[in-house]
Amino acid sequence: MTLFSLDDLKAAAALVRPVVPETPAYEWPLLSKRTGAKVWVKHENHTPIGAFKLRGGLVYLDGLRRAGALPKGVVSATRGNHGQSIALAAARFGIPAVIVVPESNSTEKNAAMEGLGAELVVSGKDFDESRVTAGRIAEERDFHFVPSFHIDLVKGVATYAHELFTAVPDLAVAYVPIGMGSGICGMIAARDLLGLDTEIVGVVADEAPAYALSFEAGRPTSTDSARTFADGMACRDPHPDALAIIRRGAARILRLTEDEIAGAVRVYYADTHNLAEGAGAAALAGLIRERERYAGRRAAVILSGGNIDASVFTEILEGRTPKV
């Protein structure tokens, strides 16, 4: 199944580039020494919102504009980075954005969304409950509901994968965190359009294993909770379209412990002096676990975001694993 063409992807890159300059892909010697592989980090923590999601929001709203369907306002649910993406994109298109977040969401991500002009609504114990509230607000205000997974979102974020594969040829593997699935699906789509044979490995938190369980079962499998400090991966209900793409194009999905994810946050700071949020560090945690598999080969990890609260980061640097 072809999601979009290479020309479509290049057009999306041209749209994204004025707002999101190409992010670097650096080979970090200390990471290579630590894992035994030649390790490149794709620094999506270096976008204007500190995360890869911005690419998708821009392409999604431009698609509505080109279809003559730009709404009077948009609403979406998020744990943070998707919300920042929609808030910034909405501001560029001159329409208001309402972003619904769960209770106990990251205070710093909340502040960032409000700073970008979004109206923030706190509702629900987790992302999936917030999504219900967002749907209700869309009906009440006649706003457009922006989903967390859509082909235009995938096309937008696939631009980071196109940049990576162009900058770093002959990768044996790329590790990608999975939230609702746009990041890994974009990686799969770009790899296939370029005709590459790079293995793509998804990673999830063991406390939020819905996509891993679904991958194994061959069908969407929900969980009762997603209690991980890596909030970008805190998904309970997998999207069936995303799952189909992942099952077709990913080699496997790893379930990572909270300790492994926290350890990777520390490693990023020690070896590269970059901030990584939990989901942003998860890909590196996956490579560290499987380092013997790729010793001496070229590997990439996606640092999908660096939006970590100071209190959480401090706790991790002090050697503890945050509890949720």
Image (spheres, rainbow, N blue to C red):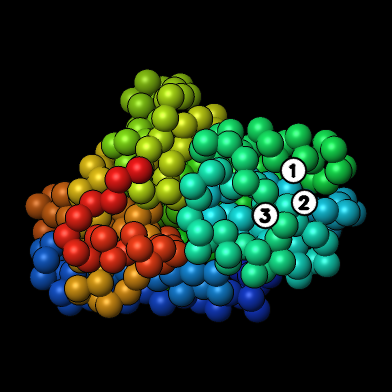
Name the residue tied to disc 2.
74
Image quadrant where one finds the C terminus: top left
Residue 313 is at least partly visible in this image = yes
Query: Looking at the image, which is closer to me, 246 or 227?
Result: 227
Identify whether 165 is placed above or below 208. Answer: below
Residue receiving disc 3: 120
Q: Nearer the viewer, residue 175 or 262?
A: 262
Calculate the distance from the C-alpha at mark 2 to the C-alpha at mark 3: 12 Å
Q: Are marks 1 and 2 in contact (CB under 8 Å)?
A: yes
Q: Of residues 15 and 280, which is closer to you in this image?
A: 280
Q: Position of residue 149 (x, y in %)?
A: 60, 43
Badge nearest the viewer, 3 or 1: 3
Three-letter code, disc 3: Leu
From the image, tell me which residue sits under label 1.
145
Residue 20 lies in what quarter of the image?
bottom right
Q: Residue at x 82, y 53 (%)?
A: 73
Q: Secondary structure at mark 3?
A: strand
Q: Where 251 falls versus 9 (above or below)? A: above
Question: What amino acid does circle 1 point to?
Answer: Phe
